[in-house]
Image (cartoon, rainbow, N blue to C red):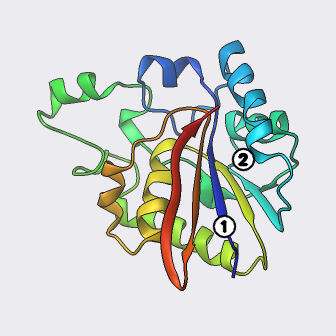
Amino acid sequence: MPSEIWLVRHGETEWSRSGQHTSRTDLPLTPEGERQAANLKRMLAGHSLALVLSSPMKRAVDTARLVGLTPQLDNDLREWDYGDYEGLTTAEIQKRVPDWTIWTGAPPNGETIEQVAARADRVIARALAAGGDVALFGHGHLLRVLGARWIGLEPSAGRLLALSTASVSVLGYERETRVIRLWNQTS
């Protein structure tokens, strides 16, 4: 059982800055995103990690490397597949589908919340098998679902767990109960 699971959301990209949904589009970090990621290094300094995993997307891998870690790639840490809504903002989507949110309506040709939750559950199982602290580098919506699943909530409860770019959150235990020890801490 890991003592802690460190969730690290990637640094800023052009689309995270503009609010565009980004899953399959492999955007690099902006110069600000690189600075943000490098600043996270001191938050993770000194932690012995049994396992470091990252989404294979450039923005997540580069964040891990700027922190000073070399991750194993895990496709289950990819962002929610937004399908036909890739590259659109919520406001643009809501012009087509009033009141739409990712939490209440599956994107056409994308993933359902249940599919994202299944991936998050697989990542949790892999972290639990690591035998020590784990760092996971990923994306906003996927990590929010993972946080909700960690504490036994439905995946839609991730809507209550906002994440900034280049943020660190820590999942752990209080005795045998899974808890959120830290959420959305930026450098």
| Number of residues whose C-alpha sits closer than 10 Å to that of mark 1, classed few (under 14), some (14–19) or many (20 or more) | many
| Front label number (1 vs 2) | 1
Image disc number at residue 147: none
Residue 107 location, x and y as percent?
A: 31, 45
Rendering quarter of residue 185: top right
Q: Tell me the element at label 2.
A: loop
Residue 109 location, x and y as percent?
A: 37, 47
Q: Nearer the viewer, residue 49 or 65?
A: 49
Point out the residue furthest to the left here. Answer: 98
Mark 1 lies on residue: 4
Above or below, 30 relative to 41: above
Mark 2 lies on residue: 56
Label 1 to label 2: alpha-carbon separation = 22 Å
Q: Is residue 84 visible?
A: yes
| Number of residues whose C-alpha sits closer than 10 Å to that of mark 2, classed few (under 14), some (14–19) or many (20 or more) | many
Q: Tell me the element at label 1.
A: loop
Q: Quadrant of the N terminus?
A: bottom right
Q: Which residue is drawn at the image coordinates 25% and 29% (left, top)?
A: 93
Instruction: Point out the tag, 1 or 2, that comes first from the N-terminus.
Output: 1
- The reply, left or right, for residue 147 in relation to residue 91 is right
Q: Is residue 118 visible?
A: no
Q: Which residue is drawn at the image coordinates 52% and 65% (left, top)?
A: 120
Above or below, 184 relative to 135: above
Say what amino acid the circle numbered 1 marks.
Glu
Residue 168 location, x and y as percent?
A: 61, 45
